[in-house]
Image (cartoon, helix red, strand yellow):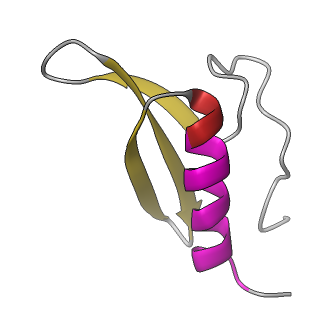
């Protein structure tokens, strides 16, 4: 089984980016969070205004930090 399934989003993705999801703040504002799961543990970065920002500034940073170097 591969450690990492790739960069393509799932067909049912609401944001169009893998590892990015939408949530609402307490003030009912839409924000995006980036997440990654490594060895059963999930890591997040939250508070992004756009899905694109969450992917490029959040998700890719998490990949660089937590995925093993090959």
User: For residue 62: magenta?
Assistant: yes
Question: How far across and down, in percent of the image, does residue 16 sit?
Answer: 73, 24
Answer with the quarter of the image where residue 55 lies.
top right
Question: Where, quadrant-wise, is the C terminus in this rendering?
Answer: bottom right
Quarter where residue 11 is shown: top right
Horizontal side of residue 49 vs 29, given as left or right:
right
- Residue visible at 51% across and 46% down in the picture: 34
Residue 51 part of the magenta-drawn span: no
Q: Residue furthest top?
A: 28
Span shown in magenta: 54-68
Tell me if residue 67 comes above or below residue 35 in the rendering. Answer: below
User: Where's the N terminus, which quadrant?
Assistant: bottom right
Q: How many numbered badges does the structure rendering display?
A: 0
Q: Is residue 65 above or below residue 46?
A: below
Name the residue at 37% across, 45% down: 46
Q: Is residue 13 left or right of residue 31?
A: right
Residue lying furthest bottom in this view?
69
- Could you tell me residue 18's position as x and y percent? 70, 39
């Amino acid at each position: 089984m591969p450690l990492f399934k790739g960069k393509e989003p799932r067909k049912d993705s609401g944001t169009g980016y893998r590892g990015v999801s939408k949530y609402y703040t307490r003030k009912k504002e839409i924000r995006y969070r980036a997440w990654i799961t490594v060895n059963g543990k999930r890591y997040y970065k939250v508070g992004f205004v756009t899905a694109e920002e969450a992917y490029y500034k959040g998700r890719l940073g998490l990949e660089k930090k937590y995925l093993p170097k090959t």
